[in-house]
Amino acid sequence: MFHQASDWLQELAFREGDGIEVALLWDSVEDRVLLNVRDGRTGEWFVCGVDRAEALEAFRHPFAYAARRRARIQQPLRATA
């Protein structure tokens, strides 16, 4: 289970398997959904914002979601004529 850091961060869903912990969280102050992923074997972790419409998909496939999100952010801007 995700260890709640404060009263304003609420766990919506949690799962663990093969040392990977995945938590879907709601930040009630910012009114946003967050994905928290931690690899218990290596200690590596990441947190990213999640579009509400994609929250369940992000929870089910956190690494694929994070990779797609990163690719969208890093796409170069194209000049328009």
Image: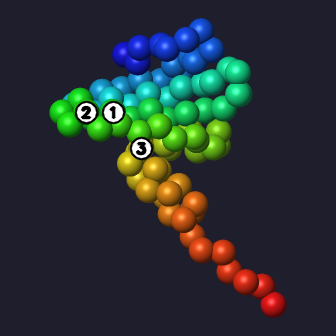
Identified by mark 1, the residue type is Arg
Number of residues whose C-alpha sits closer than 10 Å to that of mark 1, classed few (under 14), some (14–19) or many (20 or more): some
Residue drawn where x is 41% and y is 14% of the image: 3
Residue 13 visible in rendering = yes
Cα separation between marks 1 and 3: 10 Å
22 or 80, nearer to the observer? 80
Identified by mark 2, the residue type is Gly
Which label number is shown at residue 43? 2
Judging by the rendered image, the residue that carries numbered circle 1 is: 38
Q: Is residue 33 left or right of residue 58?
A: right
Q: Is residue 28 left or right of residue 41?
A: right
Q: In the image, is residue 6 above or below residue 44? A: above
Mark toward the start of the polypeptide (2 vs 1): 1
Instruction: Please give the count of numbered marks on the rendered protein.
Output: 3
Which label number is shown at residue 62? 3
Identified by mark 3, the residue type is Pro
Residue 18 visible in rendering = no
Q: Secondary structure at mark 3?
A: helix
Mark toward the start of the polypeptide (1 vs 3): 1
Q: Secondary structure at mark 2?
A: loop
Q: Residue furthest right?
A: 81
Residue contact at pointers 2 and 1, CB within 8 angstroms: yes
Number of residues whose C-alpha sits closer than 10 Å to that of mark 3, classed few (under 14), some (14–19) or many (20 or more): many
Residue contact at pointers 2 and 3, CB within 8 angstroms: no
Number of residues whose C-alpha sits closer than 10 Å to that of mark 2, classed few (under 14), some (14–19) or many (20 or more): few
Horizontal and vertical percent for residue 68?
49, 58
Cα separation between marks 2 and 3: 16 Å
Residue drawn where x is 51% and y is 19% of the image: 11
Q: Residue furthest top?
A: 7
